[in-house]
Amino acid sequence: MPQADTAERLQKVLAAAGVGSRRACEDLIFRRRVTVNGRVAKLGDKVDPASAEIYVDGARVITNTKLVYVALNKPRGVVASLDDEKGRTELADFLQGNFEQRLFHVGRLDADSEGLLLLTNDGALAHKLMHPSYEVSKTYLAEVLGPLPRTVGRRLQAGVELEDGPAKVDSFRLVDAIGKTAQVEITLHEGRKHIVRRMMDEVGHPVTRLIRTAVGPIRLGDLRPGGFRHLSNAEVAALFKAVGDEV
């Protein structure tokens, strides 16, 4: 049960989380489309927004205002760290003190790679997104040395042998080819260090530029290099769904 001093009307909490107007949220509760801590909610319920697990139509709704979910476009040459001991350009330089909370990056991108990084202070979700057992996909746009034989994609999907074991991609697509350079889109759920670069080296087409364009359901879109944005409620719900956290 929520403590009296922290409990608020469920429809008010849902409205504050951006689900809809209070009247619309009351309607959702009335139609039994809302669950709180595993049970179907009813009109008049009060909840603690900091601790309640609330779902609408099976999608998680984050009501704890202290939880932060951010997408950042890491530029090339930037260290994927929020506290680099060597004083190199790092992620914190782009956040510029916009957050009181201590954020953590979900996974890494090496300094020579660029693109989408997720940052959050939700440790439980971050752990699931990074853990291999949840198999959250990552998509990359890679510029590689060409020309590219048609067999490359089939080889990568079948699997190649690396020094630390076999690896394969979930999908491979040729995006563009100009002279001795090709652009390919690669999706995989591997999380090993430099995995895309090592796989392309193995098939004889080294990567000259690597951009991560998506992590699970979250896409980089037109976010400028060095820019960041808060994830929408729908995007956060999609991340929870990607790790199986749904009712």
Image (spheres, rainbow, N blue to C red):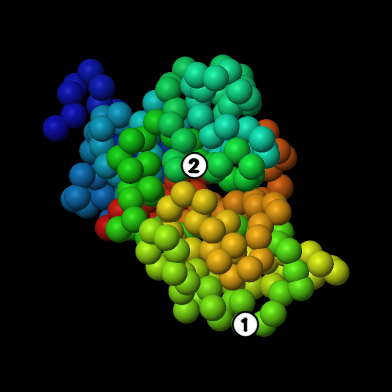
Figure quadrant of residue 102: top left
Placement of 201 over or under 42, stated as above or below: below
Number of the label disc, if any, that sits on residue 171: none
**Residue type (three-letter) at the residue carrying disc 1:** Thr
Placement of 211 over or under 165, stated as above or below: above
The percent coordinates of residue 176 (x first, y second) are: 77, 69
Residue at (53%, 73%) from the top-left corner? 156
Cα separation, mark 1 vs mark 2, equals 30 Å
Q: Nearer the viewer, residue 237 or 150?
A: 150
Outermost residue on the front side: it is 163
The percent coordinates of residue 13 (x first, y second) are: 37, 34
Q: Nearer the viewer, residue 206 or 62?
A: 206
Q: Nearer the viewer, mark 1 or mark 2?
A: 1
Crowd tier of the residue under label 1, counting other residues whose Cα lies within 10 Å: few below 14, some 14–19, many 20 or above: few
Q: Is residue 133 left or right of residue 103?
A: left
> Please, what secondary structure does the residue beneath circle 1 have?
helix
Which residue lies under the disc numbered 2? Answer: 108
The percent coordinates of residue 26 (x first, y second) are: 36, 45
Number of the label disc, if any, that sits on residue 151: 1
Q: Is residue 118 left or right of residue 124?
A: right
> Please, what secondary structure does the residue beneath circle 2 have?
loop
Figure quadrant of residue 174: bottom right
Q: Earlier in the sequence, mark 1 or mark 2?
A: 2
**Residue type (three-letter) at the residue carrying disc 2:** Arg
Residue at (54%, 58%) from the top-left corner? 198
Please state, as top left, top right, bottom left or bottom right, where the C terminus lies in the image. Answer: bottom left
Placement of 23 over or under 100, stated as above or below: below
Residue at (68%, 39%) from the top-left corner? 76
